[in-house]
């Protein structure tokens, strides 16, 4: 009997017991424990640098230049500069600066090559620090996996591919857990996205859990050391949980449908624009940056609220959105959802980052808006919105349920049935809907040489 999670073409059955007893695997566990802290520290430094850039460019600098409020046009030049820097990085540095987030969250396909890491870091900093609507999870997975694989290759040049893959997964575990604040949630995200099952799941998960668990000491501390703190998403104020009702369960169905349709529209924007990006990367990416900046500007001019609610991943803005949900009218929420979703789609087309956190923010906006419906309380509305929207964008139902439930803390547990219903509906509708975007698009984000066209219905290159 072969392992169901083994890669296609595996010739021999996998024996977990003998693998765990092997010297090579025990060495991998030790190396994973040793790598956990440095990889987590590097991930922390990356997130800290992004936060510093955002604070300086969009808060400190305009406060020093203008006596009154920051003008609504302020994001526009920075987003155009972001587009220019990302395009130049992809064009002139080795590799493709990471995967395109328009195609989802990538965790398979092998770790990033050593020479590709500078491009991944620079493109992600230009994307996240200058205001594009993407999250840091994609770059963190690539950076953590690439650094761990590099360490293995330096330690043993003839290391077998499986050892490199296992250690790369451990590095990705540690890096993404830094952001999500939970090694368990990071494990679910990576394993479900990679589609690993069977005995391979446990064998790959053990080093990853060990690396992320040891790496968490960087933030939570150990003995007298208090740790560095965390950049993980957390809500400062959570609406009280309420027991499920027939009405809230029934409302979860249309929430799932709406999220799937909205997710389809966002992906349609990103996938439709991708061929244009490949034809003239620099000009189109700068133009997309302009479009993102104008979305934020229009939102501030129309609503009088800050443009920062439209920009960035939404990780920092989400706690304030939930805590002050009562201060948003339905009209403002609709405008925020529309502008954020449009900026999200534009960012997916050409920038480098991850799709998770913007999906969570858009889902929270959708949930808060729908909480005004009769029989729909705020806590389950936010949970169902986040879960359904994450599922629509990631197509990872288990991870989506966990993201929504754990984010709400103990108050989210009573709403788990509604979240599950919304996620299942969103997943089914998303799979039934036709593939968004043009029938033929560009599959490779190649910076050098000709690009290759693929059929989106099969994912295979055209001859």
Image: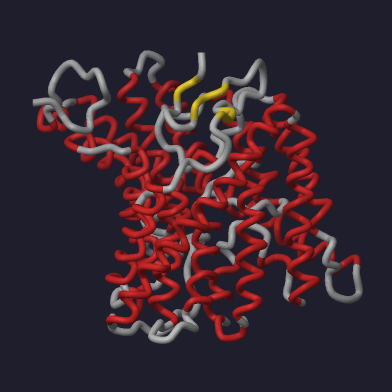
Q: Residue 422: image x %, image y %?
A: 35, 65
Residue 30 falls in which quadrant of the image? top left
Nearest to the observer: residue 347 or residue 183: 347
Q: Residue 325: image x %, image y %?
A: 55, 81
Residue 217 falls in which quadrant of the image? bottom left
In the picture provided, is 323 more to the left or to the right than 242? right
Q: Residue 297: image x %, image y %?
A: 79, 63
Nearest to the observer: residue 144 or residue 5: 5
Residue 278 position (above or below residue 211): above
Kindly tell me whether residue 365 is visible in this rendering.
yes
Which residue lies at the image location 41% right of the left edge and 83% below the top edge?
377
Which residue lies at the image location 40% right of the left edge and 25% below the top edge?
152
Kindly tell me whether residue 38 is visible in this rendering.
no
Q: Residue 66: image x %, image y %?
A: 90, 69
Nearest to the observer: residue 160 or residue 319: 319
Which residue lies at the image location 61% right of the left edge and 50% below the top edge?
345
Q: Quadrant of the N terminus?
A: top left
In the picture provided, is 23 more to the left or to the right than 328? left
Residue 399 position (above or below residue 337): above
In the picture provided, is 38 more to the left or to the right than 429? right
Which residue lies at the image location 67% right of the left edge and 51% below the top edge?
132
């Amino acid at each position: 009997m072969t392992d169901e999670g083994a890669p296609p073409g595996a010739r021999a059955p996998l024996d977990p017991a003998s693998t765990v007893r092997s010297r090579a695997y025990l060495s991998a566990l030790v190396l994973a424990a040793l790598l956990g802290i440095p990889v987590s520290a590097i991930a922390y430094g990356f997130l800290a640098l992004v936060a510093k850039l955002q604070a300086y460019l969009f808060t400190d600098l305009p406060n020093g230049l203008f006596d009154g409020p920051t003008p609504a046009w302020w994001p526009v030049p920075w987003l155009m500069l972001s587009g220019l820097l990302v395009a130049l990085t992809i064009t002139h540095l080795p590799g493709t600066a990471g995967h395109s987030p328009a195609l989802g969250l990538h965790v398979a396909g092998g770790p990033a090559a050593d020479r590709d890491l500078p491009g991944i870091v620079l493109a992600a900093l230009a994307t996240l620090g200058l205001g594009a609507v993407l999250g840091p999870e994609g770059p963190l997975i690539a950076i953590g996996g690439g650094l761990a694989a590099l360490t293995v290759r330096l330690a043993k040049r003839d290391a077998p591919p499986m050892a490199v893959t296992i250690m790369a997964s451990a590095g990705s575990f540690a890096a993404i857990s830094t952001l999500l604040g939970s090694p368990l949630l990071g494990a679910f995200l990576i394993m479900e996205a990679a589609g690993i099952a069977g005995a391979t799941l446990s064998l790959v998960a053990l080093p990853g859990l060990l690396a992320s668990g040891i790496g968490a000491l960087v933030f939570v501390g150990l003995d007298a050391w208090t740790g560095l703190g965390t950049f993980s998403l957390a809500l400062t104020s959570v609406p009280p949980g309420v027991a499920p009702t027939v009405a809230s369960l029934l409302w979860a169905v249309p929430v799932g449908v709406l999220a799937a349709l909205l997710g389809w529209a966002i992906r349609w924007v990103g996938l439709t624009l991708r061929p244009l990006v490949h034809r003239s990367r620099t000009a189109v990416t700068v133009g997309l940056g302009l479009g993102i900046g104008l979305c934020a500007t229009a939102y501030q001019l129309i609503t009088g609220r800050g443009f920062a609610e439209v920009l960035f991943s939404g990780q920092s803005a989400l706690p304030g959105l939930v805590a002050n949900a009562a201060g948003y009218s339905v009209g403002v929420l609709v405008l925020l959802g529309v502008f954020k979703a449009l900026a999200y789609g534009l960012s997916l087309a050409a920038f480098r980052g991850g799709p998770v956190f913007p999906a969570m923010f858009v889902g929270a906006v959708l949930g808060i808006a729908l909480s005004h419906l009769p029989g729909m309380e705020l806590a389950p509305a936010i949970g169902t919105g986040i879960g359904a929207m994450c599922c629509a964008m990631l197509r990872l139902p288990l991870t989506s349920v966990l993201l929504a439930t754990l984010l709400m803390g103990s108050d989210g547990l009573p709403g788990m049935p509604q979240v599950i219903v919304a996620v299942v509906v969103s997943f089914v509708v998303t799979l039934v809907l036709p593939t968004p975007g043009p029938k033929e698009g560009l599959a490779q984000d190649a910076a050098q040489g000709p690009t290759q066209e693929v059929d989106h219905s099969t994912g295979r290159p055209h001859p």
